[in-house]
């Protein structure tokens, strides 16, 4: 096995684990990095994973206190086949390629994944007239297993959909997966293979961009040397590109809001329900999630880049969303909504998959506009970027024979494997039988296991994404404080310093008193 | 999985209602009764309202002439009643799912792992929780930290002696909201602003008068259609009708919704939106041998009402057993 990488958090609180604190750049070693990846979204993490299979010094960093905490956590979680992608584009090529690799990837990385299929339905004459085009496009995109269905056939597959259906298309390989585990799995393997990971660290300056060795300046005033910079900072890619005089481009953030329905609803619908896509969006879908809920969404609302409200949810839009999604599955009105969320697409005016090699200076790549398919395409996009690194930036690629490309069996999330059902395990570790999150039925043991996992999650939100504690119908009513207490006890952090998303988001206001 | 253990009666939940049922059933001479509770103590919601000097007594004992007591005191009284019986108490044991037809519960505990218990009759006394932001339907905005449910506030304030905010804003205006405002003030925070989408508070006049002993919250309600929570990392206020009301923490109070998911997933009839189980005579559920008691029935009931309700339900259970 290779020497594992180091993990640091820019978390200066005196009660935070000393061994995880980023205090000094010397902790990262003295030599400059071969490659530094700015942005640990699913794309950055996939790239770190693929690069870690080579003999390279790689650093992955993000301003947030967990990987995958921006757009990569707020999406529809569909593994697209690419049937409706714009034909002949890089996006189409990467999505179709990645889609075929996903079943294997999910097994290797222990990412919950289900090939549930999708049903595209036309409910009025206008939509019906577009259906054949969609079908033709799918064939052109190489998705040849799609099937045209009559109304009767569609209703036979999904009896709960609207009786107004005129015709449909079945897309058998359209799938769903766990978006949270994906970024985490990529990053964990990368770390195991020697990639260093730095969280809570924003890049606010680039010095000596024209030199072979460039210097990144962090928000906390540290300097990190690297030969190659890869900007996969999603919505932050625009501001970052200005720091190294990259070619100009525009991002128009496009918000997507979702409704999450309780698990009772999941048995009603088996497949993803899709409307006929328009030029602008894929429309409002009804999607089974791998966690056992249904979600409806997303909306498509345009914002300007500096608008702080971009990640909010709004009552009006969500009502409109419910009305829209009910056109596909009228029974949605009956179903209880337990929560809502939103995600923001990195919508680039210059086009999707806007990638520039040697941007501004030799040795810098800008990746932007990974708008609506990055979750699916990330493994293929990472491979594409590595070939560009080799061909256009002259990066020397030598396989690392000691690298692994998978996670161990014990890495499956607890909610997927249900450790409490394993009586031998509970006998040995009774904590797996102590349920903490009642709704999602998550045990104390699973929370501890995640706290000790390679990326050492330390925030409530990071734990939520790994364990699903607080993600159920009561939204933490019963378990939030219990979970916080477990983190506090296990990591020796006083309860009042436990945070939702890192420093500044403590659950207790710092200027209140013990009483 | 181990083989199934059989009991005459199983009670899910050791809150006031479950304990009421257990005490009454045992008084009526039923031998093998087990009460199953997922937390590490009996008493249900009242046990989270700790006794504190200068603290707020929020549980009213009508049977003792309407005196208000601390939840903890009431929970201790309940525990004493329960311990006088021979009812088997299973703590830290969560019922995961049920087989309504066979009357089997699948449960899990650190002691035994996953096991099955069966019974001749089952009482569900699972209590209730507060509606989430999404369930209320009129709350949008950002997702900062320090937006709590009342139970979370109790665990911090009473369970850990931590006051999480100085300038509270409370969403929801029933008794639980006014009680929360009083508790926060008693702990050193300022008077809360209470917000609800109704012209006047839901909490009754006399209860509000009672909580005036501790705090004088300001109520805002008229013509609110929706509100937005503001704050990037931590809650900083709510925007309503274009106006910002600042705060440094929010408590989402009241609007109880029954914990009926076990029943629902077991195909016992439950109204989807209200999540109220459908009850017939004697508090029987749609499957024979299944009963519900306490706040699981829906609506807001005080703890003592739930205790007496549990006792009433026990009568129905005995009737049922005598007929089968
Ligand atoms: C509503 C919606 C639905 C979607 N549905 C799907 C779907 O079903 N299937 C699918 O395949 N895709 C879907 N997508 C698209 C997918 O979510 C994105 O393409 C993908 O998450 C993009 O990942 P990323 O790594 O490029 O960006 P991000 O996840 O945004 O990561 C960028 C990271 O860079 C960090 N960063 C930014 N600036 C800096 C800086 N200066 N210093 C340090 N760090 C910085 C950020 O903190 C962030 O973590 C959807 C997207 C949305 C919004
Ligand atoms: C946040 C909150 C605050 C309240 N404040 C007040 C107040 O100040 N004054 C007042 O008079 N009333 C208050 N009430 C009302 C209170 O709920 C009742 O007074 C009373 O506690 C209800 O009794 P119960 O037995 O029906 O339910 P609970 O007291 O809720 O007890 C239910 C028990 O069942 C257990 N349980 C549930 N499901 C399972 C399962 N699957 N497996 C195992 N165990 C399970 C739970 O852990 C719990 O202990 C409040 C209610 C809530 C939710």
Image (cartoon, coloured by chain):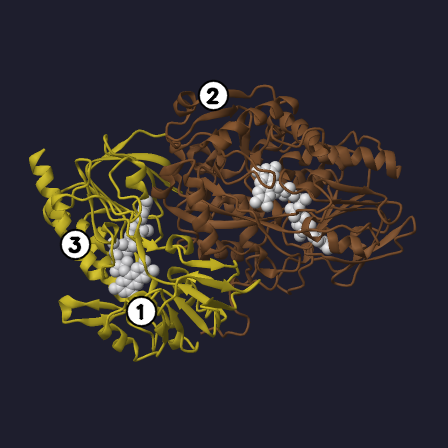
Chain colours: A brown, B yellow
In this rendering, would A127 be left or right of A79?
left
Q: Image quadrant for the N terminus of chain A?
A: top right
- Rendering coords of residue A475 (x, y %): 43, 51
Q: Is mark 3 within 8 Å of ligand 2?
A: yes
Tell me the quarter of the picture where residue B301 sits.
bottom left
**Residue under disc 3 on the same chain as residue under disc 2:** no
List the residue tagged with mark 1.
B199
Q: Is mark 2 within 8 Å of ligand 1?
A: no
Question: On screen, A137 above or below B119?
Answer: above
Give the chain letter at badge 2. A
Give how far apart the Cα atoms at labels 3 and 2 are: 55 Å
Disc 3 target residue: B309
- Secondary structure of the residue carrying tag 2 is strand
Task: Give the image location of residue A92, x and y in percent.
Answer: 68, 31
**Where is mark 2, residue-wise?**
A149
> In the picture shown, does residue A11 fall above or below A178?
below
Crowdedness near tag 1: few (<14), some (14–19) or many (≥20) residues, C-alpha within 10 Å: few
Alpha carbon of mark 2 to alpha carbon of mark 1: how far?
A: 52 Å
Give percent across and percent down for residue A165: 42, 29
Element carrying mark 1? loop
Residue drawn where x is 63% and y is 37% of the image: A373
Q: Using the image as rendered, state which of residue B170 and residue A297 is in the foreground.
A: A297
Residue at 34%, 76% in the rendered image: B53
Crowding at dot 2, Cα within 10 Å, few <14 / some 14-19 / many 20+, comes out as some
Q: Residues within 10 Å of mark 3 (few under 14, many from 20)?
A: many
Q: Chain of mark 3?
A: B
Callout 3–callout 2 Cβ contact below 8 Å: no
In the foreground, A398 or A496: A398
As measured in the structure, the alpha-carbon distance from the residue carrying label 3 to the one carrying label 1 is: 32 Å
Please determine if labels 2 and 1 lie on a single subunit: no
Q: Which mark is nearer the camera, 2 or 1?
A: 2
């Amino acid at each position: 096995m290779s020497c594992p990488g180091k993990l640091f958090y820019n978390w200066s609180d005196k009660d935070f684990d000393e061994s995880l604190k980023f205090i000094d750049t010397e902790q990262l070693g003295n030599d400059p990095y071969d490659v530094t990846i700015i942005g640990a979204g699913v794309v950055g993490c996939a790239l770190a994973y693929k690069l870690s299979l080579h003999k390279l010094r790689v650093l992955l960093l993000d301003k947030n206190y967990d990987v995958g905490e921006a757009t990569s956590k707020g999406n529809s979680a569909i593994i697209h086949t690419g049937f409706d992608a714009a034909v002949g584009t890089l996006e189409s090529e990467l999505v179709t390629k990645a889609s075929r690799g996903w079943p294997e990837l999910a097994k290797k990385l222990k990412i919950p994944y289900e090939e549930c299929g999708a049903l595209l339905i036309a409910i009025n004459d206008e939509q019906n007239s577009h259906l054949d085009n969609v079908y033709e496009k799918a064939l052109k995109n190489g998705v040849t297993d799609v099937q045209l269905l009559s109304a009767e056939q569609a209703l036979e597959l999904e009896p709960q959909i609207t009786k107004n259906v005129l015709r449909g298309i079945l897309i058998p390989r359209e799938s769903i997966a766990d978006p949270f585990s994906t970024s985490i799995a990529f990053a964990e393997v990368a770390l195991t293979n020697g990639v260093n990971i730095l969280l809570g660290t924003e890049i606010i300056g680039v010095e000596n961009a024209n030199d072979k060795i460039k210097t990144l300046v962090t928000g906390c005033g540290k300097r990190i040397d690297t030969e190659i910079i890869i900007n996969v900072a999603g919505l932050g890619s625009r501001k970052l590109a200005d720091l190294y005089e990259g070619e100009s481009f525009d991002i128009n953030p496009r918000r997507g809001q979702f409704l999450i329905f309780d698990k009772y609803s999941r048995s009603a619908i088996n497949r993803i329900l899709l409307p006929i896509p328009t030029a602008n969006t894929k429309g409002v879908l009804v999607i089974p999630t791998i966690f056992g809920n249904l979600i409806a969404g997303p909306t498509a609302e345009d914002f300007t880049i500096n608008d702080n409200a971009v990640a909010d949810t709004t009552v009006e839009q969500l009502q409109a969303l419910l009305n829209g999604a009910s056109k596909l599955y009228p029974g949605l009105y009956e179903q209880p909504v337990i929560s809502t969320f939103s995600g923001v697409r990195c919508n680039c005016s210059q086009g999707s998959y806007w990638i520039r090699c040697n941007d501004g200076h030799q040795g810098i790549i800008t990746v932007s506009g990974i708008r609506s398919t990055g979750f699916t395409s990330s493994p293929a996009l990472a491979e594409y970027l590595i070939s560009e690194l080799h061909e256009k930036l002259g990066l020397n690629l030598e396989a690392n024979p000691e690298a692994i490309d998978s996670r161990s069996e014990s890495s499956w999330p607890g909610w997927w494997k249900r450790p409490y059902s394993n009586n031998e395990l509970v006998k040995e570790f009774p904590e797996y039988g102590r349920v903490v999150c009642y709704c999602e039925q998550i045990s104390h043991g699973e929370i501890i296991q995640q706290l000790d996992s390679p990326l050492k999650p330390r925030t409530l939100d990071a734990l939520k994404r790994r364990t699903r504690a607080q993600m159920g119908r009561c939204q933490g009513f019963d378990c939030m404080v219990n979970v916080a207490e477990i983190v506090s006890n296990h990591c020796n952090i006083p309860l009042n310093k436990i945070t939702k998303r890192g420093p500044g988001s403590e659950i207790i206001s710092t200027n209140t008193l013990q009483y | 999985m181990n083989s199934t253990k059989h009991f005459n009666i199983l009670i899910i939940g050791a809150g006031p209602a479950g304990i009421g049922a257990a005490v009454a059933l045992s008084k009526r001479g039923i031998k093998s009764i087990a009460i199953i509770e997922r937390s590490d103590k009996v008493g249900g919601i009242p046990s989270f309202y700790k006794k504190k000097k200068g603290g707020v007594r929020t549980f009213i004992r009508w049977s003792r002439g309407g005196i208000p007591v601390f939840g903890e005191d009431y929970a201790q009284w309940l525990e004493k009643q329960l311990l006088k019986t021979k009812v088997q108490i299973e703590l830290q044991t969560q019922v995961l799912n049920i087989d309504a037809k066979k009357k089997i519960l699948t449960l899990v505990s650190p002691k035994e792992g996953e096991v099955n218990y069966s019974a001749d009759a089952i009482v569900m006394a699972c209590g209730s929780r507060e509606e989430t932001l999404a369930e209320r339907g009129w709350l949008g905005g950002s997702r900062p930290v320090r937006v709590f449910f009342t139970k979370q506030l109790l665990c911090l304030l009473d369970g850990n002696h931590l006051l999480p905010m100085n300038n509270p804003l409370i969403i929801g205006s029933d008794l639980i909201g006014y009680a929360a405002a009083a508790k926060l003030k008693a702990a050193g925070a300022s008077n809360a602003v209470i917000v609800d989408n109704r012209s006047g508070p839901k909490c009754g006049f006399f209860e509000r008068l009672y909580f005036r002993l501790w705090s004088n919250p300001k109520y805002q309600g008229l013509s609110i259609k929706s509100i937005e929570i503001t704050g990037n990392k931590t809650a900083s206020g709510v925007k309503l009708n274009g106006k910002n009301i600042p705060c440094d923490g929010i408590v989402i109070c009241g609007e109880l919704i029954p914990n009926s998911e076990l029943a629902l997933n077991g195909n016992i009839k439950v109204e989807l939106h209200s999540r109220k189980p459908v009850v017939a005579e004697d508090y029987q559920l749609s499957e024979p041998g299944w009963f519900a008691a306490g706040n699981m029935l829906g609506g807001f009931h005080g703890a003592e009402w739930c205790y007496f309700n549990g006792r009433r339900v026990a009568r129905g259970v005995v009737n049922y057993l005598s007929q089968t």
